[in-house]
Image: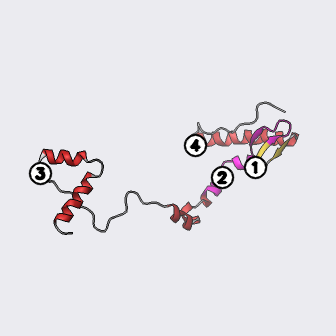
Amino acid sequence: MPKNWPAFVTKDLDDSPGGEAELQRRWELYNEEMQALIAAGGVHQDDDGWWVDDATGELIGPDPEIERPSTDDELAQFRPFTEVFPEQAESIRRSRGRPPLESPKQQVTLRIDADVLARLRASGKGWQGRVNDVLKKSVGL
């Protein structure tokens, strides 16, 4: 069995016509090499569609049909995930940010003595919330 298995490398290709032609050329070469390897024997396909060397157990590569570039007709049949699986798409859709509050807080500017502000900040994380609680209590809310 050969030590260098066929490879189908595409990461260096772009979507230009030249890239598409090179993709097709590489796939045809890969397909020929894999079909010859399969015909020669000594390999089997596992449950996941990968070809395995019988002698060593080494993974050779995926089924050439899996790796085959999609044809224009196949690409034309593709539909967005949201059309094919609307329930799943809705379940994974997330809105960004916090949910809206019923009564959001208002930002204001107050002039406070420096020593009072320093004491409030020194009380640690959440000092603004504690100031809000004190103000609520002082106005009877």
Report which residue position mark 1 lands on. Answer: 49
Would you identify the image quadrant in which residue 53 lies?
Answer: top right
Q: Work out whether residue 65 or residue 117 is closer to the camera in this orientation and state it.
A: 117
Disc number lying in front (2 or 3): 3
Task: Identify the secondary structure beneath mark 3.
Answer: loop
Q: What residue type is labelled 1?
A: Gly
Q: Work out which residue is located at the far right of the displayed protein and give it.
A: 41
Please indicate, yes or no, whether residue 58 appears anywhere in the rendered image: yes
Disc number lying in front (2 or 4): 2
Report which residue position mark 4 lands on. Answer: 17
Which is more N-terminal, label 1 or label 2?
A: 1
Which is more N-terminal, label 3 or label 2?
A: 2
Task: Identify the secondary structure beneath mark 4.
Answer: helix
Q: How is the image coloured?
A: secondary structure
Cα separation between marks 2 and 1: 21 Å
Say which residue appears at 19% left-offset and 46% top-offset: 119
